[in-house]
Image (cartoon, helix red, strand yellow):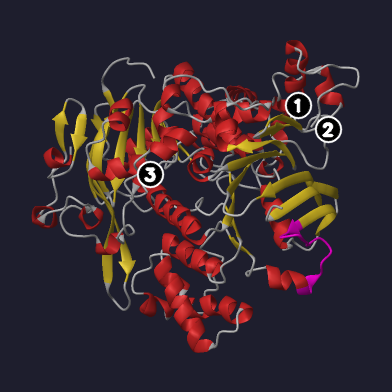
Amino acid sequence: MSLLEVKDLHTSFFTDAGEVKAVNGVSFFLDRGKVLGIVGESGSGKSVTAYSIMQILAGTGKIVSGSIKLDGQELVGAGEKVMKTVRGNKVSIIFQDPMTSLNPTYTIGRQLMEAILLHTDRNKKEAWDRAVEMLRLVNVNEPEKRMKQYPFEFSGGMRQRVMIAMALACEPDILIADEPTTALDVTIQAQILELMGSLQKELGMAIIMITHDLGVVAQMCDEVIVMYAGSICEQGTADEIFYNPCHEYTKGLMRSIPTANTAGKKLRPITGTPIDLLNMPAGCPFAPRCDAAMKICTKERCESMQLNDDHRAACWMNVKQGVEDGSITLEGGANHE
Amino acid sequence: MSEQANRPLIEVKDLKEYFNINMGMFKSKPLKAVDGVSFSINKGETLGLVGESGCGKTTVGRTILHLYKPTAGEIWYDGKKLETKADIQEFRKKATMVFQDPYSSLNPRMTVSDIIGEPLDIHKLYSTKQERMERILELMGHVGLNSEHASRYAHEFSGGQRQRIGIARALAVNPDFIVCDEPVSALDVSIQAQVINMFDELQDKLGLTYLFIAHDLLVVRHISDRIAVMYLGKMVELADAAEIYDRPLHPYSKSLLSAVPVPDPKAARANQRIVLSGDIPSPLNAPSGCPFRTRCQYATEQCAAEMPAFKEVEKGHFVACHRTAEVN
């Protein structure tokens, strides 16, 4: 049994303009001690997937259907009481912006101790010691002194370290990192990624890394999910996704990144703009921007297909290729799953 | 990207820009945002300017355009020093800017045609209303916007399209030189590639010269002919784009480049990152001597005593480091 099993998750926001299907049938597993990357552009539903797991959606957002099982325990419909024992304790989250996710009016120490006092039996003295220990773990110098300081006295990288310390204080099984380094400079980003990697090995937790930066994914993740318009286009091991992308969107993304080989040449970007989630097309959501789109792509959405042990993708091109080389026979014999 | 006429279009000589920071009653302290920076940009060339936040790269861009009055130093345009108000007025017809944030750099109360037309109005670059409109539509065509977008407002557009509007505005006066201040950092990867390609095409078509400021080193490498690296208001290295990536000489450039996450899992696993300890010091309390010495593993007493000169160690490769020989 996997640590986290998400099955056919649908999360929508009910706005005045209509229902926005931000997450539209997402399924994945996460095993203990693994790092899963979720990549996608803004509006692809990667953050909403994470917020659905934590059930910290904005007021208009709701999990419509699907199942989220943590260690065998169903979280969808479990109620606030259960979620309070999950959040911060079994699953923690760190956010993109370390500037706004700390309370400016409380000391760092008080904010660190809050989670510890809430989720464990430790008394104030023990919580203080634990907080100092956590700050030391994330390489904050002079932790005792830092405990009494306020967030404005910390730099961006330092604040992100505090956020990580806070998230790890109760030894969660899963750490969700929502664009943890996007707001940071490259050298500071390198420090934080290094820290997360070594803590992950030391504490053996699983990480869900949400990012738009494929470089960060390549560096950190064992497995990767690529999202577009609320659904998963492709999922598999990092090596499979990077070296053998099997969805036209993933291929387009890889071509869009400037590398050493593209200097002085034209990039081949994905044309068009991301779709409007209020007006989803009938077929594949990526079809309007896809150069290789066929007739069927605009009519019917492709099911996610198992390509090999480590790789699934939802693209008709794979079916076409399968038919051409004979691994898939039409007439109901299509080798789904 | 052409190598036409190796003549500098923009020359910056020992540029300094200090901001006075109020330290309480009657006391103030200069914040040395840019502290003695010199470089030149040839006609048709793209100079990439990289560095972390607070290193002064944006201030360099803005000071060149005299959006800030330079504290000291000279700026030469096309072989002529900018001195009088009239010089600057004239210069601003030839040099424009594209801003980072496509959301806050467009006035939400103006239509697209008014935004793009504003520089035309200011510099009185048309004689009839019809001529103005024709020019606006031509500019919109350059950046891939439809003519029916002209009467819309900025909020009706996505981030990528807004950046196109910003670029059309920068092109309105028919400039030779554009300062691009992080023009793609707010955009998604797929849109970013579209805008980068557009910068390329416009350069070829209109013979533009760019100062391309960015913190995304992969983007900078793609677009630039030469790259300059800044740290705490000083320029630490300047060389050809390929050269600086393959053979960085300054310890800061080395660690900066090794810190870039490459989108290639095998390379990422093999990459020996040089992770710097600590944060960038505050520019208000910059270290004496070489600004990088507090984070540099090669630092000696000499580095604390004096600022290394920015000198040409190989043809076209400038470095400011006392210990170039030992580092490499």
Q: Quadrant of residue B1?
A: top left
Residue B108 in the image: above or below residue B288: above
Q: Name the residue beneath numbered marker 1.
A: A288
Q: Judge if badges 1 and 2 mark residues of a common chain.
A: yes
Give amino acid for label 2. Answer: Pro
Q: Name the residue beneath numbered marker 3.
A: B259
Element assignment for label 1: helix
| Image location of residue A312, percent across then percent down | 70, 33
| Image location of residue B326, percent across then percent down | 13, 41
The residue depicted at 48 percent of the width and 78 percent of the height is A130
Q: Judge if badges 3 and 2 mark residues of a common chain.
A: no
Nearest the viewer among B120 and B5 is: B5
Asked if residue A134 lies in the magenta stretch, the reply is no
Give amino acid for label 3. Answer: Ala
| Image location of residue B110, percent across then percent down | 65, 43
Answer whether labels 1 and 2 touch (C-beta < 8 Å). Answer: yes
**Can residue B208 be seen?**
no
Nearest the viewer among A246 and B317 is: A246
Magenta highlight range: A69-81
Q: Which mark is residue B248?
A: none
Residue furthest to the front in view is A1
Circle 2 crowding by C-alpha within 10 Å: few under 14, some 14–19, many from 20: some
The residue depicted at 55 percent of the width and 88 percent of the height is A123
In space, the residues marked 3 and 1 are separated at their CA atoms by 36 Å
The residue depicted at 65 percent of the width and 27 percent of the height is B145
Element assignment for label 2: loop
Which of the two labelled residues, at mark 1 and mark 2, occupies the earlier sequence position? 2
Dot 3 falls on which chain? B
* Quarter placement of the C terminus of chain A: top right
